Image (spheres, rainbow, N blue to C red):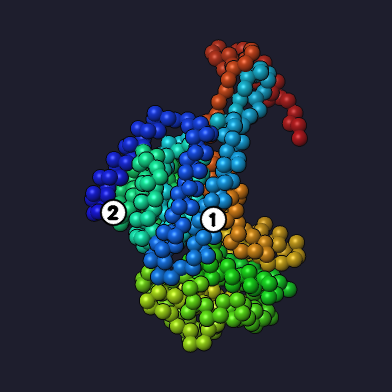
Amino acid sequence: MSDHLAIVELNAAFASQKTAFAADRAPSAATRKARIETMMDMVRAYRHSIHDALAADFGSHPKGASDLIEMLGILGRAQYALDHLEEWMRPQPRHADPALMGRSEVYIQPQPKGVIGNIVPWNFPFDIALGPMVDMFAAGNRVMIKPSDYTPACAELLKIMIGEYFPADLAYVAVGGLDLARAFSKLPLDHLLYTGSPNVGREIMAAAASNLTPVTLELGGKCPTVMTSGSVTRENVDTVIGTKIIKNGQMCISVDHVYVPREDVAAFTDHARAFMAEVVPDYAKTSECTGIISDRHLARLSGMLDEVANLASVVTFEENAATDPETRRMPMHLVIDPPADTAVMTEEIFGPIMPVIPYDSLADVIDRINAGERPLAVYVFSENENQIAQVLDETTTGGAAVNLCAIQGGLPSLGFGGTGSSGMGRHHGEDGFREFSNPRGVVVKKGDVNVDLFWSPYDKAARLVEETMSAPVLG
């Protein structure tokens, strides 16, 4: 289908969703649960098709990663919402001064927003399409999804899956290229979620602004890991490298670069080499290695390595390490102490390249982190509570983990999102439910109230004003 026809279909689907929402603005908990359960059934039914679509788009994609992240992650998020939905939907009481409001009830009522759009990135085409859909359904909304055109097989499968299990006026997938994506972001949606790069995020936010559409932006960034003195152990280095090779580094909360005490750089490299040799031998030659998403992205990563080839020590872990152009499987590389102005230090890497930066002072590391844009996450390895507190208290990031990496992005109960250039807003669990709900403030009069103080003439309120203005401040 051409983008022109896709845009016509998109507009028709949007109109049908607006009409359907107007007829059912407050779906019951039972209805919301049924929608989530249907989505769970859909994911289970299409398990093997999801494997095949991911392999087709990435050239190589481990089935274990597909199961854990693109399916079980969604199912876990859905089950968590089912377990807590009634609690989230309850009105939240707020305080009101009885001298003014008597026995009146005051509360926040979470309302469905309406029709919510989700522009999905290529790196997790099912998890980031269907995971937030759990939150959106839990909040009582209707959902429109625009998958990435870098993952055409996954996009077509999503359209088939959702078309089979849901009516278009409840959930709809728009498949197409750049013109369709632009049209999607200009729809007068009731909320828009975008996951991707900061540069495109700015364009999405500008397009949404024309309709005053609120946005949630998940934009990534160069997530640093800080290894403190004494923390460069085999266990900790395994955690860092094991995280880095998830999706072959193509993950927004992956370890982008790691700060290592100068005296421990050799030990870090040795532990990393041992992990790769013992746990994933011949990594890039096996089905455990995810292919780089496109030739263009592969050329960008290769260019990063070419730039630092004569400027830093580049460590590979496989004999005759080479990228397979057919599957785009690229070996893991460490780049030891690259110059600060090279691409591996100035751009989000999003691949199997990890700069290792020697340091002498933890304060200097924190200064370097704070001198850049705010990352989506920071990871700190230490058994020293003061050092952990120093890193967490003196940096500002979307999320963080201590003696772990990236797990904060996979817990159904923990709100996930960025800050500054790494994004705004949160989804996952209760935070996602609230993100995609309208928190309507409600007052219900009970008994006598004294709101007539606000009416003219104001001499009735004069004594109260004088008493309040002259009263001492109580701590």
Q: Quadrant of residue 8?
A: top left
> In which quadrant is the C terminus drawn?
top right
Residue drawn at x 36%, y 71% as measured from the top left = 296
The percent coordinates of residue 356 (x first, y second) are 58, 76
Q: Is residue 256 visible?
A: no
Badge 1 element: helix
Q: Residue at x 55, y 69 (%)?
A: 244
**Left or right of 67 in this view: 151:** left
Residue at image location 45% in from the left, 38% down from the top: 141
Q: Indicate whether 405 appears above or below 108.
A: below
Within-10-Å neighbours for mark 2: few <14, some 14–19, many 20+: few
Q: Position of residue 399 (x, y in %)?
A: 59, 56
Q: Which residue is mark 2?
A: 179
Residue at 66% of width from left, 59% of height from top? 392
User: Can residue 173 be seen here?
Assistant: yes
Residue type at the position of mark 2? Asp
Q: Specify the label residue 72 is tagged with.
A: 1
Residue depth check, mark 2 versus mark 1: number of the one nearer the observer: 1
Give the CA separation, mark 2 to mark 1.
33 Å
Question: Relative to the observer, which residue lies in front, 291 or 49?
Answer: 49
x and y percentages locating residue 2 in the rendered image: 24, 54
Q: How many marks?
A: 2
Quadrant housing residue 327:
bottom left
Q: Name which of mark 2 and mark 1 comes first in the sequence.
A: 1
Q: Tell me residue 119's x, y (percent).
A: 40, 51
